[in-house]
Structures are given as structure tokens and as C-alpha cells.
Amino acid sequence: MASRTFVRLLDEHASADRVFRMEEEATKITIDVIGKVICGYDFKCLTSGGQFMEWMRGALFWAFDHQSLNPFHRYSLLRPLVTRYYRMKMITYVGKILDERFAAGKSEASKALKKKTGIDLALELYAKDYNRQMGASATTMNAEFRKAAIDNLLVLLFAGHDTTSSTLCYCYKLLSEHPHTLTAARQELDEVFGVDVSAAQQLRENPFLINKLDYSLAVIKEVLRLWSPASTAKLGRNDFFIRDPISGELLPTDGINIWTPSFAMGRSKKIWGEDVDEFKPERFLPENVAKVPADAWRPFEKGPRNCIGQELTMIEIKTVLALTLREFDVQGAFDELASLSNDGTHWTKDKSFQKGPQEVFGDPIKTTAQNASIELGWHAPRKSWINDLGQVLNGTGTNGFAFNGSQLPAGTPYGTYNWCNMPHVRAQEYPKASDEYELQYVEVSTYWSVYTNEINPFAQTGFNGSCQFPQITRQGLDDSWQHGKDLYGVYHDLLGFLPNDLSDKVTYRVTNNQITSQVAGILINGMYAPEDDVSLRIQPTGVDSLEPQYSCPAASTRYSSYGVGSKASNWTAHLTAAKPLFNSLDSISGIASDSTDWHKSFDHYYDNLSARQCHAKPLPCNINDTSSCVTQEQANTVYRLGQYEYSFIYRDSPQSLQAAVGSYGVWLAELAQNIRDTVAGKSEVIYRHNVAHDGSVSRLLSILQVEQMVWVGMGAEVVFEVYTSKKDGGKKYLRVLWGGQVLKSSSPTLGKIDMLDLDVFLAYVDGLVGERAQKVVEFCAS
């Protein structure tokens, strides 16, 4: 029950797109679980906050700090009174539970109970011991036993809640930073519980399934090795000696405390080797467990004085991970701690919890513009209906996405996804920067049926249309003109940044595809309406980085290994499930059921159907039977599946980042150099506009690790704005706009790219593609 409530709370946070303190929710569930297992009582921390949790936090907050140098803190006259108050509250609370269980233990009904809590077992032993000593049944509880029982229950609650909750938090943190490990953990959950099957339901029916999660257990053990939450100290004796591992000398322990620093042991290169600081759960898989150094892993200590709650802890964490890893993507938001300064939690009372350290053991904890650790790994996008196959297949409609014209339906707010004419920068919604920043440079990347006579015996299969590739429609040209007018309205009229007339400060670049030149021509007309010819920049065919056309076999292989055309089960799952839809569409279009091009993805059907609806054309019918037509419901399902595919190819797969870097990294290197040249005064160009393709923009969004990926529609636009601060010595900052608003990235280095330290962004690009794109060259040749 507690685990399901925990899942519901996380779902509420995720649905509200809310930043929250994971340690707060993790603490609640650990207290509730301990309370249920040990006391047989619901402490209600998850559902109502819980008074006991408040008293426990108060006691911890007012506890004496031997390390404090503040005399007002060390010698506070209030401390003894406040701590006594909280202690008495907890003693009364737990004592009442103990008394209730003692009374219930004498009833006949309780004897039929098969499940016994920690209190039940203790009271049962107490009753047996009392009977042996007194020769009669216990009718009242011995005061000494009652005090000892309460003290021990409080110890279990105090010692168990923080260690378990912190371990759970580190599990989420390390898994989010190691996507391959997260993928492996999720695959194990699929194998044990079944794909798209609730782990909660399976565990209710067969709780012993939790013991099959070998990889999850290995993850927890590796987390505890790296971030052991506690250590132990033991009092030495005159007959106990410690052997020096090097000299063999026996060292006496009488009169001293012996401390076993499990945290330091877990980080020792002498014990674990050179990769000691790397997160490798595989160390603790059954086939490798014999290789683990003897007595080296001891977060629960060892021997007769080991932690009695370790089994409960491991089962609890495994259960919580089983219920949440497939449902949620957890992303660190340490740079947003300030926004939680008034969230009412225990952590806000202590200023030290409002800001975290920059780095611990090379592990970035908090990213700031001033002192950043550059994280280059892949980070999963936000979970939504787009990357939830169940919602895609079983849903209806298009979840608010528009596919039926350049103009949004009346009452629909601008910024809504519109495949026919994507939202872009325009004056009405433009998020103007603070006056303390001065715009210095802008670079924009944008992405803007066939008739056959029935007598022709060589007519191709597929839907009839009226356009021949490459060709852009009149409506597309109109949209491009308006796009140019909107850009001019922002960067000239609103900001006064662009010059009044075209000059060397403004350049336009296109690809070798004629469509981009058509779009660029009409877009420039919308911006400047020039009377003379305007030159367009273009790179030679075969090496163009904007389309891109340069050869990178490694990137192509990477894409084909998990995406379109691959046999990967997580890719083919949606194709298999959508087989009935394929059959229906094939029967209308005349496409052969074994046509690879039309069935390796929904790309062709998506393009055909959406292009018609964008131009207010009816959905297609069978050429021989005009009563057999594609329904709107079928088209909507194709659109949902198309969004799912795009998200999977360019963001959801952990391999997508490297594939995008390999295939589009050269353009990123050019962007970085353009920015550097302008900032250094080596270039007079202040505005560059690139007209590319959907595959270009999608790869760019993949590298930026956009928080939510969508199929890149017509007029999709990514804008890079470089600003100079007027206050801190001319420092440079970057803002990236997607769909006319600030882009949110899943990368902890980039985050919400709004006045990001320019050096951080350039370091991110350099780290991925290398100087002069050298890393791209090396990868492509690998």
C-alpha cells in the first residue's frame, strides 16, 4: 500500500511538471514501511505528512551538535526543553501503539493472525518468558520491558528511515546519470513482470518475484558501496587485537573505539581497483559475486552486531524501484534548489540544504553557470503520452496536436504543436530578456500530391496526389513568408537588433535540396523584401553539414541498430502491435503487405496523410473503391505512432545522442566557431539563418537533449541567442528558443537554456564533437 501511494505522489509531481525534493518523499515511505512492518501501524506520512515524522524531524533539528562552533547553538537553553518535548511526544505515540498491540495480543482473534510484526514477535517472546518466570499469563506489561521496547522501536525508526531514504535517492540519481544501467534494470523488470504489466499487481499475486531481481539488487549494492549512509564504531577489549595487514603486528584495542569507515572502504583503490569511482552494478551480479573482495562490502557491517534491518531495507528499495523505474524518469535539478526555499520542508530550515557542493569524487552534484561540471552523457526525455506506447496505441485523438491546416483552430493558444506550421518566434509571445542583457548574435535553424492517369499501366501503388517532389506548395510559401515577417518583427521591430536593410551582417544558408532555396527566397522576402538578388550560402554536395550529407557509417550503423529497419524488440514492438492498422491502410492504398519501405516505420503513411490534411484535402480512398477511405481515427493513430517513432529514434534510445553527434556534429562545431568568431570580433555577422530539413532539426534537438521530442513539423525553428551582460564585466550568456519559447533540456549541464554561461555551452559542444569536429571524424571512422 505504501509503495503504491508513493507511486501516486510521484505521478502527481510528474503530471504537474513540478520540481520537488525526492528525499522528502523517500523519507515518508521509509517511515511508513518501517511503521507497518515493525509496529503494524500506519504512520500516515505519505498521506497526511504524519505527526510522528514532524516530531522526529524536530528532535533531529534540535539535537546537540558537538562540531558546532556557534556558542549560541552549542549552549542553547531551549535545547533540553525542546528535545525533551519531542522525545516525550514520540514515546507517547509509540507507547500507545505498543499498548494496543499488547492488548490485542491477548484476544482470541489475534491468535489467528498469520502475519506478525516486530512488536508481535517481541510481545510473544515476552509473554513466554513471563509465563516461565511467573507461571501465569501476563495481564500487564512490565514497566522495564515497556521502556526497553519503546527505546528499541525508536532506534529502528530513527536508524532505518534516513539510511534507506538516502540510498533510494542515490539509486535514482545514479541510474539517471547512467542510462545504459537504467535500460538494463528496466529490461530485467520486463523479463520478471512482463512488458506493459503492472509490477504492483504481479507482486500482490506472487511476492517472491522480488527475489528474481538480481540486477536491481546489484544496483542497490553498488549504490551502497559508493554512497554508504552509515558506519559503525565498537568498543575495544583487552583480549581483542587487530592484525596489521602489512606487518602482521597485533595491535591492542583496549580503551579505544574501533571505527569501520565503510564509506572510505567502498572508495579504496587498494580494495576495488582503478575503477573504484565508476558505477558498475555488474560487480554484484551472481556470476561475479565471488570476485568481490572478502569483507570489503559492509554498509550493514558484519557479524553478530550487523544491522538487523538490512533485509527489510533491501526488499523495500527493490520493491520501490520495481514500481517506479519503468514509470518515471528522474532528473536531478540541483540548480533549482533556490525555487524550493519556501516549500515548507525540513530542509528549508537549514540554509546548508539550499545549496549543494559542486563536485564529490568527480560526481557533479550541482551545476551552475559560474562553476560547472560538464555532463556529456545521454539523459532520458520527460515521460509523456508521446513515448508511452500504451497511450499511443490505446489512446484516441491527437492529444491537442494539430494536423489540419496552417492556422490553429479558434481558441487554441499559440505554441500548440501544429505539424503544418510549427510555432516559432514572433513578437506577441516572444520572451524578452532582461534589460541587463544585450543581444549580440543570433543563429536560426528552420525546416520548412502526384497525379497519374488511370490508363497508365505502370502507375505506382500508394495514394494519389497532385505534387511531385521536390516542390513546395503555395500554402507552404505563404507560411514561409509569414515566418520571415515574424522574425523581422522580433529582431528588428521589437529588439532593434537587425539592420534596416540587408548587409554583410546577415547571411542565409541552404542545403543542396531545391526546397530549402525556395523557402529561403520567400522567407527573405518576408523579412526584407529586397529588390536585388540575394546570395545564399551552400556547401558542396556530399559534404554538406547542414543536410547533412557527409559520410558517417558509424552513425548510420548506430541508428539502424535500434531504430528504423532494425530487429530490436523495443523498436519492433509498436510495428507488431500496429499490424491491423497496417493491413487496413494497405488495403486502401494498394501497398503490398511485404513492402519494406512502407512497413519499417510509419514515416510514409504519416507524410501522406498529414500533407493532405494540412492542405484541407480529404483523407485518401481506394482508387478502385471510393467508399473505402482512411478514417480520421486511423489517421490520428498514425500521427500518434509517428510522434512515438520520432521520440524513440532521436531521444528515448540511449544510443540516440551518439548517433546524432556523429551525423550532425560537424554543424554543431560550425555553430560554436561562428559564436566564437562573433564574440571575439573576428566576424561582423550578427545574424545567420540556416534553412534545413526535419532530419537536421531533429538531430540538433537530440544533441541538445530536448526535454520532450516531437516529430519536427513545417517551419520548426531552433534559435541560438548570445547575450552580453551589462553588469558582470561583459560576460557572455546563451539562450536557446524552441517553438518560440526557452528550450528545456534533460541534460543537467544545459537544463533550461535561459542565460546559460556561454562557456558552459561551448564546453558541452566541444566535449561531444571535439575541436574542429575531430571527435566526429574519429567516431565516423570507427
Image (tube, grey):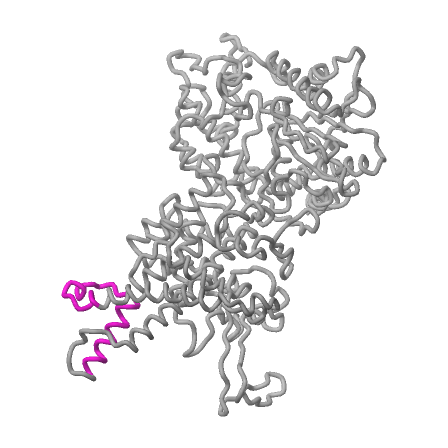
Indicate left or right for 767 with 334 as reference: right
> Is residue 323 something one can see in this rendering?
yes
Residue shown at 55%/35% (left/top)?
A: 709
Residue 492 appears left or right of 317: right
Determine the image quadrant of residue 703: top right
Instruction: Tell which of 118 and 384 is nearer to you.
Output: 118
| Magenta residues (range) | 103-132
Closer to the camera, 384 or 583? Answer: 384
Is 250 a magenta residue? no
For residue 456, above or below residue 11: above
> Mainly helix, strand or loop, the magenta region?
helix
Task: Name the residue rendered at 70%, 15% in the picture.
Answer: 526
Whether residue 781 is visible: no
The percent coordinates of residue 262 (x first, y second) are: 54, 71
Residue at the (63%, 29%) spot, across then down: 431
Image spot of residue 528 (x, y percent)? 75, 16
Question: Could you tell me residue 13's position as x and y percent?
Answer: 46, 43
The residue at the far front in this view is: 77
